[in-house]
Image (spheres, coloured by chain):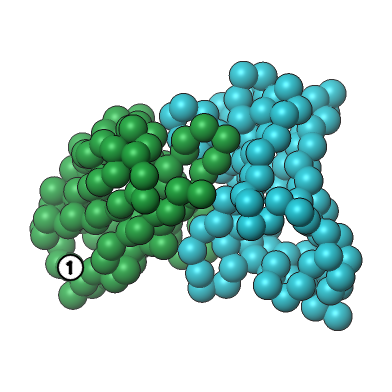
Amino acid sequence: DIQMTQSPSTLSASVGDRVTITCRASESIGNWMAWYQQKRGKAPKLLIYRASTLETGVPSRFSGSGSGTEFTLTISSLQPDDFGTYYCQRYTSFSRSFGQGTKVDVK
Amino acid sequence: QVQLQESGPGLVKPSETLSLTCTVSGGSMRSYYWSWIRQPPGKGLEWIGYLYYTDSTNYNPSLKNRVTISVDSSKNQFSLKVNSVTAADTAVYYCARDSDYGLDVWGQGTTVTVSS
């Protein structure tokens, strides 16, 4: 089964910072990568699909890049509403799996 | 606008079967996959499996022997059963719409505790 390795596990940042989260797949997954934001006690929210396509209504400060085995989620200027936990997810044929998550907290 | 709602018992005894239902409202189940995902307390997300609206399924290999996902198209519902539960199955369980665009619609989640 394809494994996803997400880093870092925790990231401390300030409002206005540029934030980058990385996800690596154990084998090529093309561009079948999605990113989610989860706030405490809430269901995850889709941010990015197909590695780089912004979901409708998601602010343009979020962007995704990568293909094959290495993927990145970038927040260009961190806003107060962006603190929370972020997950990558691969969705290849017949299977899905998530990264371990990255908690973005206040520096 | 499609909405999902999980329902089922919040407490299950060890060795028994966990059963949950996800009701889809505001849209059709056709042409989509429908996934179950869970999140143990304080931990990350785990994909359990999905069902295509035609009733074909695929499961996480780590859970495959204990999990069944099925559909009742007439009620716009799909269900999850996990057999022989232990404390490790205690989690928030989510249902979600699944497609080439990721998991774009989620239920609010339901907490299931395994305890005698």
- Answer with left or right where residue B89 lies relative to residue B46: right
Q: Is B105 located above or below residue B29 in the figure?
A: below
How far across and down, in percent of the image, does residue A8 sit? 26, 66
Residue B53 falls in image quadrant? top right
In this view of the protein, which residue sits in the foreground, B75 or B26? B75
Say if B84 sits above or below A72 in the image: below
What's the amino acid at mark 1?
Answer: Ala
Secondary structure under tag 1 reads strand
Q: Is residue A97 left or right of residue A73?
A: right
User: Which image quadrant is residue A14 in?
Assistant: bottom left
Q: Residue at x 55, y 56 (%)?
A: B46
According to the picture, the residue beneath numbered tag 1 turns out to be: A13
Residue A74 appears at what percent x and percent y?
19, 48
Which residue is rendered at x = 35% and y = 49% of the image? A25
Q: Name the colour assigned to chain B in the rendering.
A: cyan
Question: Residue B80, position in %: x, y?
Answer: 76, 47
Q: Chain of mark 1?
A: A
How many residues crowd around disc 1 within 10 Å: few (fewer than 14), some, or many (20 or more)? some
Q: Colour of chain A?
A: green
